[in-house]
Every structure is written in C-alpha cells, then in structure tokens.
Amino acid sequence: IYPAFVFGTLTYLIIMFSNLLVLTVIAMNKKLHKPMFILLFNLPISDIVGATAFFPHLIFSIVAENRLISHHACIFQAFLIHVYGTGNLLILSAMAYDRYIAICFPLRYTTIMNSHNLMKMIVITWFINLSMMFTLFILLVRFKTCRTNIVDFYCNNQSLVKLICDNTSVNDYYGLGTIFLLMGGPLALILYTYAQILRTCVITNHTDARQKAIQTCATHLIVFLSLQINTVFALISHRIDSSSPVLRRAFGVSVLIFPPLLDPIIYGLKTKELKQCIVMFL
C-alpha cells in the first residue's frame, strides 16, 4: 500500500508542479506570447485535467483500500479523461500546423497565424473536443446499468458501456466514428505537415535551420505517436474479446501517466526560449 501511495502522490505532485510551471512562465513572459507558445499553453491545461481526473481518486482508493466509486462520479471521471485524451491529440495537431506554416511559409507566417486566426484555432479545437465528448456521454447516461464492476483502473466510456444490458449499438457506432475521426484526422494532418516540413528541410541551404526544424518536429512526432499508439490500443482492445486485459490496463494507465509527466519536461528542455524563461523564473 505505502509504496503505491508514495508513487501515486509524488507522480501527481510532479505533474502538477511542472505543468503549472510551464503555464505560469508562458503567461508571465511577454516574449513567449507567440502562436507556438500560446498553442503550447493549452497542452498543460489538458494534462492537468487528465491527471486530476485520475490520480486523486487512485490515491484515495489506495489509502482506503477501497475501489468503490459512485456512478455519477465515475461518469464525470470518464468525461474528464476523454476530454484530456482528445484535447491532447487536437492541440498537438494544431501545434504541428503552426510549425508547418512557420517552416514552409515563413514570409506569410505572421499573416496566417495572426491573433484572430490563432484564437479561432484554439476555440475550434476545444469546441470539437467538448462537443464530441459531451455527445458521447449524453448517449451513455440515458441507459440504466445492470452491472457494477469497472474492468479498468479508472472509468472510461467503454468500461461504462459494459455495465449496460440494453442495446448500445448507437453508442458503439458513435464511439467507432469518434475514434476514426479523432485518431485518423490528427494523424493525417501530422503526416502531411511533417512530410512538407521534411521536403522543405531537404531543399533548404541553411544547415542550422534544417537541424533545428528536424529536431523540433522529431520531438513533437514522438510525443504525438506515443500518445496515439497507447490510446488506440486501449480503445480498440475493449472491442476485441481475445485481447489481454492486463495489456489493455497497462496501455490505458500509461496514457494518463506519461504524457502529463513528460510533456512539460520535453517541451521545457527542447524549446530554447521556454527553457531560458523557466531557468530565469526559478
């Protein structure tokens, strides 16, 4: 009990401290009020939502040695966790688009990524996220449950649907549609923008600029693919009866631990301007 409690508490505190640090530094430094950092500002918010939905209840259940959770609290936890996962994918996609414009169209960057278009991009990102997740859970709460055992370490849409004995085909079709759109759409955008960035880097004569662009994109791509691969496996495994429940839980938990823990470290250390501001702030 005690090692698990210490690990969970320390992990949550590190996540909260590092993400709040990134938020504070970006908010307080005017030289970071650029499109790239304003988009990045949304990532710690999403990470904090996901970590807060998962860790406090986990820590409480370890201390109390009791995994009980009320049905309403379970739905709320699941909603926040899905908002976090979807938010991260969409925010990372918006950041990839920003890098694409900056590297492939540098002379038009300030025109395309002006404050009006930037705010529009952020609002649309959160609107798509919240509206699709709200619809997903509205479809869920109309049913009464006939079972009580959540098959994962935390509440999510798939594990809640498994508590229902009625026909949930509409939920299944909508869930598959959201997986296809929210996984396929960002992946297609990332692949296209990075292919164009690599093409630009190959034909450019500036070695330093090419190195910097490739380093930035490689870091971004690793963060995105690690999140997406874990998320896809965790979601799809619920629909495959032969899949290992241990692996499903491991991938599901890793989605909630590693991105919130590593995002501020990766972007804080790899982004030169942000790193300098963090050092000055500390």
Image (tube, rainbow, N blue to C red):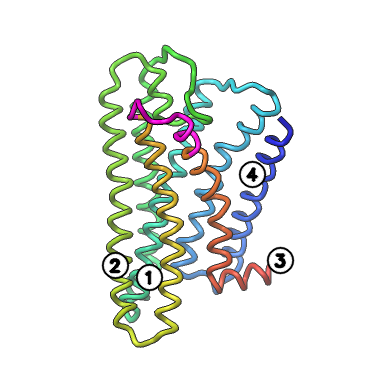
Q: Earlier in the sequence, mark 4 or mark 2?
A: 4
The alpha-carbon separation of the residues under discs 3 and 1 comes to 31 Å
Q: Provide the secondary structure element on which disc 1 rests.
A: loop
Give me the disc on residue 282. 3
Residue type, label 2: Ala
Q: Which stretch did the figure color magenta?
A: 239-250
- Give the amino acid type for the residue marked by disc 1 in the picture: Asn
Q: Which residue is mark 2?
A: 195
Residue at 30 percent of width and 27 percent of height: 171
Residue neighbourhood size for the residue with mark 1, other residues' Cα within 10 Å, grouped as few (<14), some (14–19), many (≥20): few
Is 227 rendered above or below residue 281?
Answer: above
**Front position in the image: 118 or 129:** 129
Which one is nearer the viewer's eye here, 255 or 46?
255
Q: Which mark is residue 175?
A: none
Nearest to the eye among marks 4 and 2: give it. Answer: 2
Kindly identify the residue that appears in the image at 55 percent across and 50 percent down. 260
Is there a contact, CB below 8 Å, between mark 3 and mark 2? no
What is the spatial separation of the Cα atoms under label 1 and label 2, in whole angstroms? 24 Å
Decide which of tag 3 and tag 2 comes sooner along the chain.
Answer: 2
Real-space CA distance between mark 4 and mark 1, rounded to the nearest whole angstrom:
36 Å
Which numbered dot is residue 114? 1
Which quadrant holds the C terminus? bottom right
Disc 2 crowd, CA 10 A, few/some/many (<14, 14-19, 20+): few
The mark nearer the N terminus, 1 or 2, is 1
**Disc 3 and disc 1 in contact, CB within 8 angstroms:** no
Q: Nearer the viewer, mark 1 or mark 2?
A: 2
